[in-house]
Image (cartoon, rainbow, N blue to C red):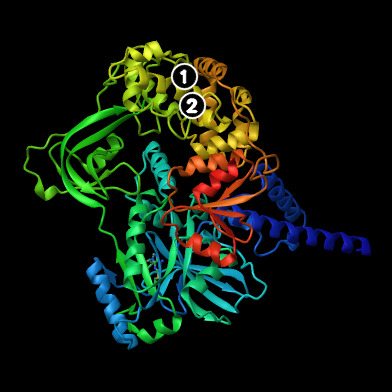
Amino acid sequence: MGAKNTEKTSQVARRIADLVQQIHHHDFRYYVLDDPEISDAEYDRLFRELQELEAGYPELRLSDSPTQRVGGKALDQFRKATHRVPMLSLANALSEKEFREFDERAHRVLELPDAEPIEYHAELKFDGLSVSLTYEDGQFVRAATRGDGETGEDVTQNVRTIRSVPLRLSTGSPPRAIEIRGEAILPIRDFERLNEEQARKGQKLFANPRNAAAGSLRQLDPGVTASRPLTVFAYGLGHVEGLDVPTMSGYQDLLARWGFRVSDWRKVSRGADEVIAFYREIEQRREKLPFEIDGVVVKLNRFQEIDRAGYISRSPRGMVAFKYPPRQETTTVEDIIVQVGRTGALTPVAIVAPVYLGGATVRRATLHNQDEIDRKDIRIGDKVVIQRAGDVIPEVVKVIESARTGKERKFHLPGHCPVCGSKVERRSGEAVVRCVSRDCVAQLKERIRHLVMIDALNIEGMGERIVEQLVDAGLVRRYADVFKLTQEQVLELEGFAERSSAKLIEAIERAREPELYRVIFGLGIRHVGERTAKVLANHYGELEPLFSAAQEELEGIHEIGPEVARSIRDYFEDAQHRQDVKNLLKQLTVKPPRRGTAGKGVFAGKTLVLTGTLPTLGRSEATRMIEDQGGKVSSSVSKKTDFVLAGAEAGSKLDKARELGIRVIDEGEFLQLLK
Ligand code: IVH
């Protein structure tokens, strides 16, 4: 061993430390802030370099290396993990009245006069499963489920695969030891995707995102957990040594600084009225949140006061779960119809007696596929429990068998497409039955609807009914036909007059210069959602290379798995599809993806955060305007934020902006700047 070797080794060690640091930082930007700073390709390069160095110098691998997130060996069973401070539960308040009673009790316990408002910390009640994360000297060492509150299961290996959980606390002076409590959840979209996949594989569907999160975390094979996009929101504190924060709000700010995902929707509220206003505001937004919540949690903001309030039957008296009404209801299945989707999938849908559920009247519930109908034994005439989760289409949870009269009728999917009469097919390994006709009108309508929808080419005003008319009239058969429509043709359709037809044509004209990812998304390729479309757009910069991209090439792109790659391949292998896309492109001037924040525009190089409801601009509209002007939109306020664009009912982001002295502008000022 010469001096040279030692020198080389220490050089490698430094590079490894540097790469680990960088990747942690980029994981944080991506998985916690949802605001990446580098491209996926650059990230991959860093990751691969680290993997290679670690392979050559295994002894230099750091214990918190991001390469260790991939999951280790499968276990036979979980080890037990005892919490140093038990994980308790919360008492509920099921109405405003009950919440006021809680507030009154809090006044009594704290011996405060009624007129003095109490300082609370109000935050989201995430609907997942709670976990306790132990850090020693800033390093992640253990994760455990709640279990019976005293002892849970050791899920360290699994939690290590969750990218929003930091492997080390990003702070110079971490506490000696700390148990951080939080909620592992699966966002609604990911839950839907997971269920689609389960359905395709003919496996059992998860009833809701919480069950899916629990099923994903409590996996003996960490490889399975790693494949599920779980995330953890941090909010609570168990055992701690060497940390002194007086308030819950301060503590959660600290968690965010340490690199945890902490919701922006939290508020220090003075008095019950402010808490109730927050509760109502969140209720309004609940449908729009990308994950499930079932209430807000209200806590005395000062830890000292929580301690003083004490405990009653395993719940702290200084906290309460202020819950929203459940989103399950019972109703009757009046009929079962079959819908034909964009990709030809036949979906059985229950027509149910109308019920009010989670803010809307429900008349239909998806039954997913025949296997699900059989498994749940759902029959026409059955009394059933239905539920909705977020924006998701309501679904039937279970049949109330005790209500059966014997008159219920079983249902079977037809052997032919109910719209075009062609034969249907069920590929082996799939639970879905599809209409295989190329000319099925139902599929065509869905494809066109998808192409013109807001997240795709965004042709304003071209809704479901109009697409239906255009297809039925034979005016639109192929993607490109949409852009060949004339005002005269539109005028002939029922319900159109001079003005409305001109408006539609104008909307079509405005849609002729889409960004590349919107076109890719708009094609409606199976498994290619908006996110994947962006990944593809950024990777290729244009559409044509996709025509001939091989399976392995696609799989090589960060974030694209084998199934998605196969689906893209299948789509473009079809000559008709290629022709359709080429013809569509002839009608469009596609904008290539914007790279970086360099360039021109009033917001060049600037980061903006949107919060609240703007008087006239929609969120996506404002985002586009900012990006068009070279700016970036981030989801959370930090020192790096340049402007906060705030509308009505702006929440904690606005508070934070004020705290950090960041310039806050309203829509008027924003539009002024754009001028
Ligand atoms: S604090 C004493 N904060 O709700 C327990 N819990 O019903 C302190 N939960 O087991 C918990 N979001 O799993 C707290 N922001 C939040 C929460 C939250 C969800 C869950 C947690 C707990 C359950 C209690």
- Which quadrant is home to the N terminus? bottom right
Question: Can residue 466 be seen in this snapshot?
Answer: yes
Q: Quadrant of ligand 1?
A: bottom left
Q: In the rendered view, would you say 356 is above or below 251?
A: above
Q: Which residue is mark 1?
A: 479
Horizontal and vertical percent position of residue 672: 56, 44
Which amino acid type is marked by label 1?
A: Tyr
Q: Residue at x 56, y 26 (%)?
A: 513
Query: In the rendered structure, are the residues bearing label 2 and label 1 in contact, judged by CB atoms less than 8 Å apart?
Result: yes
**Location of mark 2 (residue):** 523
Residue 501 percent location from the top left of the image: 37, 19
Looking at the image, tell me whether mark 2 or mark 1 is earlier in sequence order: 1
Res 174 → quadrant: bottom right
The answer to whether 337 appears left or right of 200 in the picture is: left
**Can you give x and y, in whole percent of width and height, for residue 15 in the image?**
78, 58
Q: Please, what is the three-letter code of the amino acid marked with disc 2?
A: Leu
**Does residue 373 appear left or right of residue 459 in this picture?**
left
